[in-house]
Every structure is written in C-alpha cells, then in structure tokens.
Image: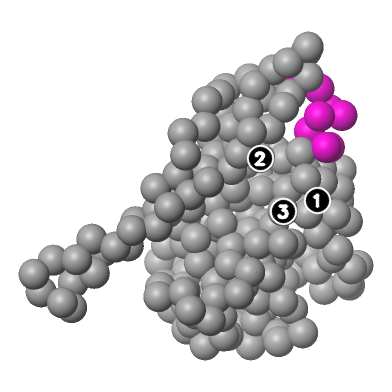
Amino acid sequence: MSFKILLVDDDPTLVWHYLIFEYIPGISIGEIYEQVCFDDKIALARNLGEATRQMIRLPLDHAPIFRSGLEDFTFFLHTQRDRCLTNHLQWHSLPSHLIEQIEDYLLPVETLVESRFPHGLLHADITRDHILGHIEADRWVTLGLIDFGDARVGNVYYDLPALHIDLFQCDKRLLRAYLEAYGFWEREEFVHQAMSVALLHEFNIFAGLSENL
C-alpha cells in the first residue's frame, strides 16, 4: 500500500509532492547478485516486463506532476540532445573516438518518440539497488521495486538503459526475456533506437563499462 500527501507552504504556489510507501523488508538484489541463479534472474526479467507494461498503462489524466502526452517527453529528449555531447565529454565513460561519432549517430528525437509506441509512467532507474527481496530456500524472491524519484513519462526505450546495463549486466538473454514479457515486437531499428536513447539518458549509465570498451 502507498499513500500520497501534499505538503503545502503558506505560499499556495509552493506545493511539494511526496510518496510515502509501506516499509519493505529485505535486501537489494545487487548485494547478492552473484548468488542469484540464472533461472531466478530470468523470472525477475519476465516479472519486470509484465509489471512495467502495466505501469505504462496507468491513467495519468488527474496526476498533478505527470502528463500522459508526448510533448513533455519530446521536450526532455530535445534538451538532452542539446547537451548530449557536453555530458559525455564531462563523463569520460566512452572512449574519445566514440564520443566524436555521437552527433552523427543519434537518431532524430521525432523518431525516438514515435506515437505508435505506448507512452506512460516509467520508473526510469530500474537498477540492482532498486529491486528488493530475499533468499528463500536458495531461491530469490522479489518483494518490491523502490525509488521512484526519477520517474517520468516516456516510452519503454527510456527504461531499457538502466535495466540492461545495470540490472541485467548486459546479458541479452535477460533483455529478451524482459521484452517478450513486455510484449515488445522485433524491429530492425531496435538497436539504433535503444542506443540513441541510452546516449541521451539523464544519467551516466555507461559508467563502469569503460574497461570493457
């Protein structure tokens, strides 16, 4: 169960939105990731696919801080597009010869927000630290997904970078299990679109991968 409250200052224009959730006991899967068997990781990927598919369909018509249309997501990606090269030059997570190719590689924002994709609420930071659960009879049991502080409206592509790079540790089998459960269909341009959105991500999701490049 979760509860939403509004803390209102004397100034009526200052409204702070908070979510208060029921306490979830357990540990993050990141703390014991190597101990979790592959079958349980596959099951987690499928469960997340089903859960995020349902989450993106949640009605947002009366949400005070989220809008269900494409305008906000389009504006956000355009902003990220303008600062993309500067971000990666500052982060230094990609080799310089790849950073030099970013401008020519990125797909147009209009392609990344095409309307035939469902748009709705995203967690936007599904990492190992945000999956809570415990080990029971040597098997991983998921109890919850936490930390919606970076949630935003968008399409599934924006949820994929943290999922694939951090939670799935770039294991394509886990990514495929997630996408199949989500109901995502095969597309020839998938890799280019997914990589473009990853490069435009608000956070340095390539941190920690430098040694493998």
* Disc 2 element: helix
Decide: few, some or many residues near mark 2? Use Cα within 10 Å; few <14, some 14-19, many ≥20.
Answer: many
- Looking at the rendered structure, the kind of residue marked 3 is Ala
Q: Nearer the viewer, mark 3 or mark 2?
A: 3
Looking at the rendering, which quadrant does residue 124 occupy? bottom right
Could you tell which of marks 1 and 3 lies nearer the N-terminus? Answer: 3
Answer left or right for 66 relative to 28.
left
Picture disc at residue 167: 2
Answer left or right for 62 relative to 167.
left
Q: Residue at x 40, y 66 (%)?
A: 86
- Looking at the rendered structure, the kind of residue marked 2 is Leu
Measured from the top left, where is residue 98 in percent x and y?
60, 59
Question: 175 or 89, which lies in front?
Answer: 175
Q: Nearer the viewer, mark 1 or mark 3?
A: 3
Q: CA distance from mark 1 to mark 3?
A: 10 Å
The residue sitting at the left extreme is 10
Measured from the top left, where is residue 178 in percent x and y?
80, 51
Residue 53, visible in the rendered structure: yes
Q: CA distance from mark 1 to mark 2?
A: 11 Å
- Looking at the rendered structure, the kind of residue marked 1 is Tyr
Q: CA distance from mark 3 to mark 2?
A: 15 Å
Q: Residue at x 91, y 67 (%)?
A: 186
Q: Where is 160 relative to 21, above or below?
A: below
Decide: few, some or many residues near mark 3? Use Cα within 10 Å; few <14, some 14-19, many ≥20.
Answer: some
Residue to which mark 1 is pinned: 178
The magenta stretch spans which residues?
A: 36-43
Could you tell which of marks 3 and 2 lies nearer the N-terminus? Answer: 3
Residue to which mark 3 is pinned: 51
